Image (cartoon, grey):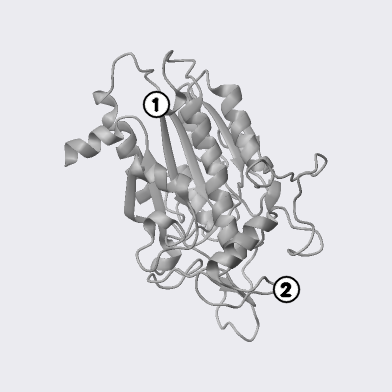
Amino acid sequence: MKILSSALLIIFLPIATIAKERPSKPNVVLILTDDLGWQDVKCYDIDEPSPMETPNIDRLAERGVKFWQAYSPAPTCAPSRCAIMSGNHPARAQKTHVVGGAPPTPNHKLAWSMIAPWYSGRMPANEMTIARVLRENGYVTGHSGKWHMAIDHKAFPQPEDQGFDWTRSSRGARSGMSTNRLTNFATYQSKDPFKLDQNGFPFHQTNEDALTFLRQNNATPFFLYYATWLVHTPIHTRAQDLLKKYCEKLKVEQPTNPKEWTLEGQRNPYYCAMVEELDYYIGTVLHYLSETDDPRWPGHKLEENTYIIFTSDNGGMEGHAKEVITDNYPLDKGKISAMEGGTRVPLIIAGPGIQLLLVYNH
């Protein structure tokens, strides 16, 4: 796949230029976001400035390679994930839809004149995955967040069936808000399961799981697959002040109807808040890597021997009934469509030697 082959090219070409004392097996962190559009990340925006603030992702792009023409293997979640994990086209990975695994039936007796083919509900359990290859070469492999490489999130095979030593799948702060998205926001109270931190962001178990894996396994070569639930539906934020911030920034009224948002363009304050939350949580992982001593390389930080790959499983979801989420313009369409808006994704790769490679190429 284009993303996978590009990532491997960037990772392994510069190794020969790196000092001999560096540990021979670099760490790898793959951050796969969910439904993040190419135009949702500020450093990619090419028309009007994006209202969404992504300072951590932008800084990652500054010290790495920012790909301008990266494409997801498919315009939907599960096929892309299977392709990225296996290196196969979705058809060869036997996963071409988010569900599948059922006998062919018409989706609607009147609206559809054709019956879809019977496609597999999952990637083969014995597929050779990135995790399996790295584990066979001395890496400890970990997964945090979304999986969905089978008919649903909990169906076989799970991460431990396909090469992962360690896995956690909590939705964290992305679990549905009780009652509706305008009530029961997170607080600073100690008993609140989504307690706001000193910066006003809710506790997110998915992110904490990713950090836990890093803390527990940084003394060995590690591969972390951090599959965020952000910025997939449901479109909500538990940070009330963050919602208010984007209402003011977008110059829109505070929402009163929790069931809809119909203003067109990148003017959904819930979604903008979600994108900033995503950036914030990713920032905590990047900060950990930059501030933590490398047990395998005394005198150096983990970041110095870690490759970070940041991308999305497909293009941005522009909306559904009664909800305008975002706008991929000037790209056409969005998630589910094979047009540019549904398949063009952000892709940033940073790590040891990459800046040297950039200088050499210039």
Q: Nearer the viewer, residue 272 or 137?
A: 272
Horizontal and vertical percent for residue 142?
57, 32
Q: Quadrant of the C terminus?
A: top left
Horizontal and vertical percent for residue 109?
65, 83
Quadrant of the rendered structure where residue 26 is?
top left
Horizontal and vertical percent for residue 293?
49, 19
**Residue highlighted by disc 2:** 256
Horizontal and vertical percent for residue 120?
57, 56
Q: Position of 43 compared to 32: left or right? A: left
Identity of the residue drawn at 47% across and 19% down? 294
**Residue highlighted by disc 1:** 304
> As shown in the figure, which amino acid type bears the numbered disc 1?
Glu
> As shown in the figure, which amino acid type bears the numbered disc 2?
Thr
Q: Position of 249 compared to 185: left or right? A: left
Q: Earlier in the sequence, mark 2 or mark 1?
A: 2
Q: Position of 62 compared to 105: left or right? A: left
Near mark 2 (Cα within 10 A), the count class, few <14, some 14-19 or many ≥20, is few
Real-space Cα distance between discs 2 and 1?
A: 47 Å
